[in-house]
Image (cartoon, rainbow, N blue to C red):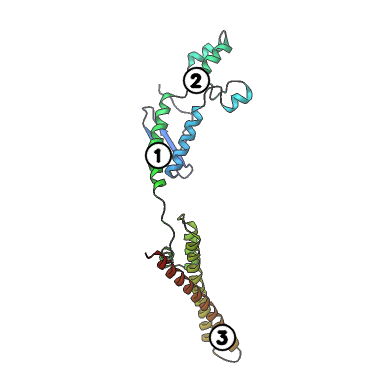
């Protein structure tokens, strides 16, 4: 009569980060949403845990008694022997002989070897540095967004590309310039809406004048950032020329 399990656990990548399933015939399936380097690290941690010799795990060392997990007898016959005459000596022999399943060595080695090339490739391929052109491209891509500068700042902060202080300053200039021009456009829209609704009269003249002054100030700030960025890129190009 085939063995019927008491319960069947259903796992998916919605609830688990790494799923390893090994059938009785030895075929293994691995599913994970972790990066390859993280999968390899987890598998090596599992291997290290099973590599601990019997009687040497933290629980056995702390209690002075065999661990029920790591120091279990390797077979039923050894368990019976340990329960009989000379139990202490038999238990010691069982502890010395207790090993992790032989097939697990090959299984973990196979997984680690499969993941290691991906780790080596990722280590060898450094991500490209963040450049001003990358930030400009992100601004163009996010232009349809309600707040392009905010969306671009999000993308830059999430990007793991390395950057020097100069490259970070260039990204800050470009994003702040785009943000300032976005604010100037909002002020211009308020100016036009107020003038269209109320017209130009004694009551609205001061408000409309304030809108115009704020718009000019914000645009001047954006222009200054653009000028500083142009000068910085010009100087960098001159230094790059032989």
Q: Residue tagged by mark 3? A: 208
Reading the chain from its start, which is encountered first: label 1 or label 2? Answer: 2
Query: Who's the residue at 45% across and 67% down the image?
Result: 145
Which of the two residues, 54 or 191, is positioned nearer the viewer here? Answer: 54
Judging from the image, what secondary structure is the residue with disc 3 in?
helix
Query: Who's the residue at 47% across and 64% down the image?
Result: 152
Query: Who's the residue at 37% across and 28% down the image?
Result: 26
Judging from the image, what secondary structure is the residue with disc 1 in?
helix
Which of the two residues, 205 or 214, is positioned nearer the viewer here? Answer: 214
- Residue 242: give x, y in percent of width and height: 37, 64
Q: Which mark is residue 98?
A: 2
Which of the two residues, 18 or 197, is positioned nearer the viewer here? Answer: 18
Judging from the image, what secondary structure is the residue with disc 2 in?
loop
Which callout, 1 or 2, points to the residue nearer the camera?
1
Q: Residue tagged by mark 1? A: 116
Q: Which mark is residue 227?
A: none
- Residue 142: give x, y in percent of width and height: 43, 66
- Decide: few, some or many residues near mark 2? Use Cα within 10 Å; few <14, some 14-19, many ≥20: some
Query: Who's the residue at 53% across and 76% down the image?
Result: 221
Reading the chain from its start, which is encountered first: label 3 or label 1? Answer: 1
């Amino acid at each position: 009569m085939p063995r019927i399990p008491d319960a069947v656990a259903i796992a998916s990548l919605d609830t688990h980060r790494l799923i390893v399933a090994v059938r009785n015939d030895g075929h293994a399936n691995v599913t994970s949403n972790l990066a390859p380097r993280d999968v390899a690290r987890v598998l090596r941690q599992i291997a290290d845990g099973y590599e601990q010799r019997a009687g040497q795990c933290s629980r056995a060392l702390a209690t002075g008694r065999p661990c029920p997990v790591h120091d279990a007898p390797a077979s039923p016959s050894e368990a019976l022997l340990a329960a009989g005459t000379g139990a202490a000596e038999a238990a010691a022999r069982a502890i010395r002989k207790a090993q992790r399943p032989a097939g697990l060595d090959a299984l973990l080695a196979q997984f680690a070897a499969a993941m290691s090339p991906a780790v080596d490739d990722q280590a060898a391929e450094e991500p490209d540095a963040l450049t001003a052109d990358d930030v400009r491209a992100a601004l163009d891509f996010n232009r349809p967004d309600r707040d392009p500068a905010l969306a671009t700042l999000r993308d830059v902060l999430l990007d793991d590309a390395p950057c020097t202080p100069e490259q970070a300053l260039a990204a800050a200039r470009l994003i702040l310039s785009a943000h300032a021009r976005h604010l100037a456009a909002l002020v211009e829209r308020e100016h036009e809406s107020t003038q269209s609704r109320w017209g130009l009269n004694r009551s609205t003249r001061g408000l409309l004048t304030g809108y115009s002054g704020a718009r000019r100030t914000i645009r001047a700030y954006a222009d200054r950032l653009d000028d500083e960025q142009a000068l910085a890129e010009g100087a960098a190009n001159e230094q790059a020329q032989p």
